[in-house]
Image (tube, rainbow, N blue to C red):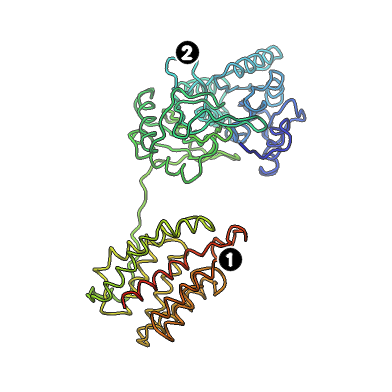
Amino acid sequence: MKHFFNRRENIVTEALDGLLQTAPVGSLARLDTYPDIKVILRGDWNKDRVAVLSGGGAGHEPSHAGFVGRGMLTAAVSGEIFASPSVDAVLTAIRAVTGSMGCLLIVKNYTGDRLNFGLAAEKARVEGFRVEMVIVADDIALPDLAQPRGVAGTLFVHKIAGYLSEGGADLETIAAAARSAADSIVSLGVSLSSCSIPGQAHSERLGADEGELGLGIHGEPGAERIALQEARSIVSTMSERLSAALPGDGDYALLINNLGSVPPIEMGLIAHTVLTSSLAERVKLTIGPAPLMTALNMNGFSLSLIRLDAEREAALRSPVALHAWVPAVERHEVVVVPAVAVPGAQLAEASHDSAADRLIAAICDHLLSLEAELNSLDARAGDGDTGSTVATGSRSVLAQIARLPLTDIAATLSSIGSILSTSMGGSSGVLLSIFFTAAAKEYSDTRDMASALLAGLDRMTFYGGAGVGDRTMVDALDPALRALKAGGLAAAASAARAGADATRRMKKARAGRASYIGERDLEGVPDPGAMAVAAVFEVAAGLR
């Protein structure tokens, strides 16, 4: 795996400084104990309330430093990647932020964190500080495990304790609320890959068709391997296990956490799937989807739920001035607003013309047969979807051919333009829709097909910006239409094929995705759009 870093030993300190440099001025600071002791604290803290302190190994960003601020953590202490901070580091943080009201430590249930934070707490008590510690063990992946892991549900405890601290509650009240909250949280994660640590060799333990259910946030193996499957199936399994582990009836808050490298589009799909699953009826508040407690670049997500009461709900809803927290929102249905009806004249009525029907059907059928060939050509110089895009437009026209006003040529051209703008997508669909729409307007004025199509070409090239020699469909369409105007369909087909073949010798595209491709990759490869145009004219000429 590849990573962006300078020196491995400086990754954590440089990342924390990046957070400090991009946070609002004056909101965050760090102790002058770098690099051995890494503590991020509120820039406005004056020790007049209970300090809420958490932390652990790095690699879970934005946890924990991203949640330092008014209404959540007072300070966060960081170790190296996946390594607990030292006893001295935690003790230094306690000294820096704790006043007469005391300090609450929120610790995830890992041996290193428990021991190091625990010893630091005992030493701090010897020094006269009032310190309480809460351990979070929210992972339900291994139900028989005596000491469940602390994972993303820990953030609920951070938020509740921070809210109470901000309101001036005493240490005993905050610690009791935090412990009660920790006992009311369940979490479960899933991933399609293990994570990789910058500067270390990585070996992926999962096969191409495998995932892991119930894994930790340090790259630990999951509780079980699962087959790669639809998101709804994965979410269904997670929902069943989480529902069975929920500690009672009532409403819950749901935290949807990206474990590192799931793309936003997939996290949106996951959120929708969860919020339409059997779990959704228990959810009142949603936080995320967002990367909140990650495992470096793990391609996975986790779900955490906490049972709500009035105090917890108020805490989770309360606004905070933090770098990374995502506001809680009440679960709601998707709002659907009716589209505005198309103004103006009604669509032309369907009519039948056997010659036009035969021509359109023959062209669409032939383009469908070229789907794989055109995709293959486009894969050499684009994103490999020209054939599929053209095939989509062809299928849509074929599906609506019985509703076309075929005896009215202008209306037919306009209808085809509308169909393509809706179905094809991408720039090619829009360009062809412009072409047919402008041609329809011209034909209604002149009743001359060649002139109408040339007018469509003029508008298409004006808006699209491509011309002859730019290695696009225009290289076949322009000479074909000019030959059609001068000599008929046979001449047009010959000119289109010659124009398409000429694109093989064009080493630089000046429009479209191919314009980003180097000369070596384009040499000898014809433009797939131009090849499609040539095929259309050859089919049309063959029917005459």
Circle 1: element type: loop
Residue at horizontal 44%, vertical 67%?
A: 430
Residue 414: x %, y % from top left? 35, 74
Q: Is residue 180 above or below residue 418?
A: above
Residue at 50% x, 45% y is 264
x, y (%) of residue 73?
Answer: 60, 31
Residue 199 lies in what quarter of the image?
top right
Separation of residues labelled 1 and 2 (CA atoms): 64 Å
Mark 1 or mark 2: name the one nearer the start of the chain: 2
User: How many discs appear?
Assistant: 2
The correct choice, above or below, for 214 with respect to 436 in the image is: above
Q: Tags 1 and 2 in contact by the CB under 8 Å rule?
A: no
The part of the image, by quadrant, that contains residue 274 is top left
Residue 375, position in %: x, y?
45, 57
| Three-letter residue code for mark 1 | Ala
Which class describes the residues within 10 Å of circle 2: few (<14), some (14-19), or many (20+)? few
Which residue is tagged 2?
146
Q: Is residue 413 left or right of residue 110?
A: left
Q: Which residue is mark 1?
A: 509
Q: Quadrant of the N terminus?
A: top right
Q: Is residue 469 above or below residue 154?
A: below
In the image, which is nearer the foreground, mark 1 or mark 2? Answer: 1
